[in-house]
Amino acid sequence: MTLWETLRIALRYTLAFGRGHLSVFMAGVSMTGLILGTALLLTVLSVMNGFEREMRERILALVPHATVHTPASFDINDGFVERLESLPQVASVSQFVSFDGMAIRGRDVVAISGLGLASMVQVTPAMAELADLNDLSGVVLGDSVAARLGVEAGDNITIIVPARGRDRRTDIVTQRLNVVSLVDTGTELDESLALMSLTQASALAGLGGGVSGLQLRYDDPFEVDSLLPQLRRELVPGSYATTWRMTHGNLYAAIQLSRDLVVLLLTSIIGVAAFNVVSALVLIVIDQRGAIAIMRTLGATPGNMASIFIAQGLIIGVLGSAIGCALGAALCSALPSIVAGLERSLQFQFLSTDVYPVSFIPVDLRGGDVVLIAAVAIVMCVLAALYPALRAARLAPASVLHQDL
């Protein structure tokens, strides 16, 4: 029996081109389960990839990869910056001022995390005008902070900061600032961000023109832990270094753990679909035992019979994974619009930065995931077809034909 004849018979048992055989129904049920499992796995995996991408491109674009906190008496311009810039994979080193305070507007009070920078990373197109913060004369608020205060660009707010620097002649530092702009990064940073110039932040923090330390950005932020010992060797007495994993590492670890658990859970769905292939093909062997016996009497070998059902498992796997991946890709492209439409219709936000790292459904469809999921589904279906193929090969044509008489 040639390869083409094997595939032709397997296709007839699987599709039957419109005939309502039991074999077609069982193959269709198996294929439907495989399609749904593959599409669901690809969609959920793409969403988890999207969270990982937003962690890298949005949150880590604003959060320093490593932070060096220096003592108040240290002269930060004494060749220290140049030494840090010469370290491996360090892309940039910049000064910063950070403080915790309160923003007040009328009776509304919101806790803020003040941040003073010389320049700003452009996470969104609207942040292009904030690239240079040296001439900023007011404050830029995260949109969630502004919403809780009920302010817009052009309004004034009062910022209160406990004194913590060298000058502690007053208990608190108070300043009235104009809200220059609002920033919507779509991340949890919007819940407390108050961005301003380095000079203004230093005055509010009571540092007398000094800074809190240095922010380092690396070419690959996920390698920062392995590079931390080299950074610590360059530190001066009284200073210390922290990394983004110490502040946001739990978030990234939670994303990775959720991704692994979801993949394990949904891969089991494909496994259940493959188990359905076993039961379907066994029933097909029983349903087509007369045809199998006739082919055996016409000269087909047990290996030919086995190859027909292995080919049928391959066909179910290829068609099911192809249609499932196509359906999953279509769902991935439509998912953000679907969720946005549901939020508008229900007047309810599914994701909020109060709880989740981003306020929208991120989707990152990767070609490698499509290939891997399809390959796993096809291999499982081929392995599932081995037992029915073995039963078909061991079928005795004489006993089958005798029972039919």
Image (cartoon, grey):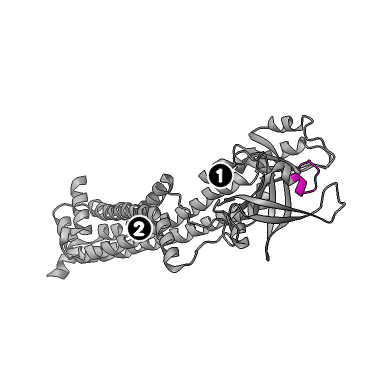
User: 44 or 190: nearer the eye?
Assistant: 190
Magenta span: helix, strand or loop, mainly? loop
Q: Where residue 252 appears, x then y in whole percent?
A: 59, 52
Left or right, residue 2 beside residue 205: left
User: 54 or 354: nearer the eye?
Assistant: 354
Q: Is residue 48 above or below residue 79?
A: below
Q: Which residues are magenta?
A: 202-211
Q: Where residue 341 appears, x then y in whole percent?
A: 41, 61
Q: Amino acid at mark 1?
A: Met
Q: Residue at x 80, y 45 (%)?
A: 207
Q: Label 2 near label 1: C-beta < 8 Å? A: no
Which residue was labeled with disc 2?
384
User: 209 or 235: nearer the eye?
Assistant: 209
Q: Residue at x 53, y 57 (%)?
A: 359
Which residue was labeled with disc 1?
127
Q: Where residue 65 appears, x then y in whole percent?
A: 65, 43
Q: Nearer the viewer, mark 1 or mark 2?
A: 1
